[in-house]
């Protein structure tokens, strides 16, 4: 029987964590739910603890912010399922159909990983250049285990590491549009100055992650070249 674990990493999500955990708890495809509170300074921890009385899930709490990469890797390590789905804590309108869109191609062995693009965003989903960094993705646990030690220090470079690993090992990736799913940007959640600072910090972490894993970058480029060459001969 196929089993699925949903992993949510949260940092200062007191306004959203209750909603996303309730949504995930109602989705029958999910066998296990894990939330990692990554050193939140607001009421995220208290809300998570209060929800344990009415929702069945596992929780991890860190006293200081360890970074999204570390939080996600720890969630993967304690998960008990064959399949994993990663979900951002600030999504709105998440439904059964969204999770099914993400996991079914992986369940059916059609692809190795599915990335989901929320359609209700500030940037039009049809031209969004940042879709490769989507936090909504489904995959097999066994495929991500080999790269967990690289993921832990990556912080906001976590999606970059996962993408590079999959391309370097010639695994297949599919993108799907998650219609009516709302995902606010940093600029929607706070003032421009703070959002811009966080955006630049995330960009630096993504660049540093790629630079520190140049072997994966090289393998990814090589595989892309060979795959494109084989298509055209």
Image (cartoon, rainbow, N blue to C red):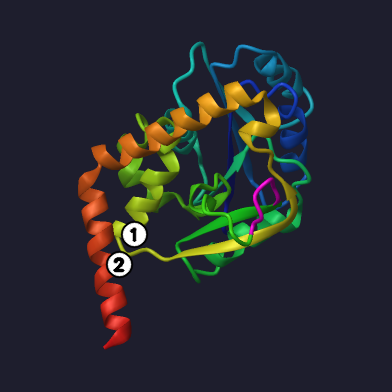
Quarter of the figure that contains the C terminus: bottom left
Name the spot of residue 130 as percent of width and height, x first. 52, 50
* Residue 133 covered by magenta stretch: no
Left or right of 5, for residue 18: right
Q: Is residue 11 visible?
A: no
Magenta stretch: dominant secondary structure: loop
Label number found at residue 167: 1
- Gap between marks 2 and 1, in whole Å? 8 Å
Q: Is residue 203 visible?
A: yes
Q: Residue furthest bottom?
A: 233
Quarter of the figure that contains the N terminus: bottom right
* Residue 121 covered by magenta stretch: yes
- Frontmost residue, 184 versus 52: 184
Name the spot of residue 214 as percent of width and height, x first. 22, 45
SS category of the residue bearing label 1:
helix
SS category of the residue bearing label 2:
helix
Q: Residue 42's image quarter? A: top right
Q: Which residue is mark 2?
A: 224
Left or right of 74, for residue 222: left
Magenta residues, start to end: 120-125
Label number found at residue 102: none
């Amino acid at each position: 029987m196929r089993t699925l674990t949903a992993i949510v990493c949260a940092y200062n999500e007191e306004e959203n964590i209750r909603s996303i955990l309730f949504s995930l708890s109602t989705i029958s495809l999910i066998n296990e739910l894990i939330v990692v509170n990554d050193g939140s300074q607001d009421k995220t921890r208290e809300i998570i603890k209060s929800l344990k009385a009415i929702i069945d899930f596992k929780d991890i709490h860190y006293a200081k912010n360890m970074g999204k990469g570390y939080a996600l890797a720890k969630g993967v390590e304690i998960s008990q399922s064959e399949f994993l789905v990663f979900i951002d804590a600030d999504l709105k309108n998440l439904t059964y159909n969204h999770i099914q869109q993400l996991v079914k191609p992986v369940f059916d062995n059609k692809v190795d990983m599915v990335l989901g693009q929320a359609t209700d965003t500030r940037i039009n989903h049809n031209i969004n250049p940042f879709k490769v960094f989507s936090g909504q993705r489904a995959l097999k646990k066994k495929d991500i285990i080999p790269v967990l030690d690289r993921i832990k220090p990556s912080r906001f470079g976590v999606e970059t590491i996962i993408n590079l690993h999959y391309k370097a090992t010639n695994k297949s990736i599919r993108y799907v549009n998650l219609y009516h799913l709302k995902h606010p940007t940093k600029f929607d959640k706070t003032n421009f100055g703070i959002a811009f600072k966080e955006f630049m910090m995330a960009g630096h972490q993504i660049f540093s992650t790629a630079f520190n894993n140049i072997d994966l970058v090289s393998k990814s480029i090589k595989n892309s070249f060979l795959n494109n060459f084989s298509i055209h001969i």
